[in-house]
Amino acid sequence: MKEILTIGTTCVTDMKKVLCLIGISMLGFSCEKIPSSATNKQIEKQLITTDSSAIHQKQSAVSDTSNTTVIHTDTVEFISTENNANYLVYHLKKDYKIRTFMNRSKTLSDIYRSDILEIQWKYEGESDLNQNAILVSLKKIGDGSVSKFRKKYPKPLSYHWSGEVPYDRDFLDGIYRNVEYYLANSKNKLIQLHLQNTDAQLGYSIEEAQKEHKSYVLIGIFNRFENRENMLQWLYIDTQNQEIYEYDLPEDRLIRFK
């Protein structure tokens, strides 16, 4: 009887070892790493340690992937810049859409609206929903209409306003750039005629105006001749989005300038 019990106990013990080895094999671990004489607690401890190490390796791989920075390269049209407390913001157009980029690279000088730029940029932010487009590098690769206009008409434009509104330098520079852009691309035959005249003295007046319950900056483009200002075209500028509108006097309506 004792002999039978001994044989049974031995069989049970052997079966436990076999089941344990099968389980370890299914988990992808080598049986050679665990000695046959190891206790259940030792086996359990080694399994937990190995499993934790595998999880840590997976987490590291995910972290490395998320930290990979992708640098994009694009050819864009320059629209304008805007001063921020910490950096300069660039408004650039691609495929008829204007996008905003934060610039931390070298700032370009002597670039004008519609100039062609080659940029490198990346996304940066704490999450996919809160990411900013950051400029890594930028360079001018082509003249736009304003650069060509400046070469063709090198005289500075004169301007004036009543003085009742204390416009700052950034505002005045922005209006100047918009007027230049209009003159460089205008199909107005009267303006084109004056641009061909080397004696022309083009300028503009600045006023505040309301149209259809909306505020605009009203620009009066003129040619000065013998101390007189001959008006050539009225423009309405929406300073919120830099849109320019030609004023159709006979129809009393605004026509978006493209």
Image (tube, rainbow, N blue to C red):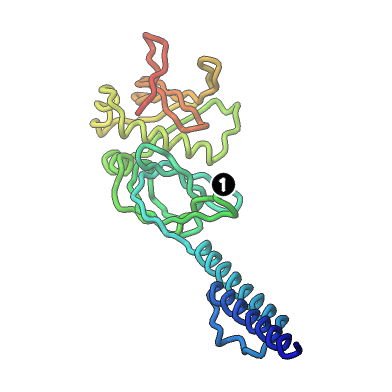
Q: Nearer the viewer, residue 46 or 146?
A: 46
32 in relation to 48, above or below: below
Q: Please give the name of the residue rendered at 58% of the width and 73% of the height, measured from the top-left corner.
A: 54
The C terminus: image quadrant: top left
Outermost front residue:
1
Q: Is residue 56 left or right of residue 242?
A: right
Q: In x, y percent, where is residue 34?
A: 61, 86
Q: In x, y percent, where is residue 26?
A: 54, 72
Label 1, on which residue? 129
Residue 189 location, quadrant: top left
Q: Please give the name of the residue rendered at 54% of the width and 64% of the height, measured from the top-left corner.
A: 62
Q: In x, y percent, where is residue 4?
A: 71, 86
The N terminus: image quadrant: bottom right
77 in relation to 221, above or below: below
Q: Please give the name of the residue rendered at 38% of the width and 9% of the height, measured from the top-left corner.
A: 251
Q: Nearer the viewer, residue 196 or 245?
A: 245
Q: Is residue 137 left or right of residue 195?
A: right
Any part of residue 199 in sight: yes
Amino acid carrying label 1: it is Leu
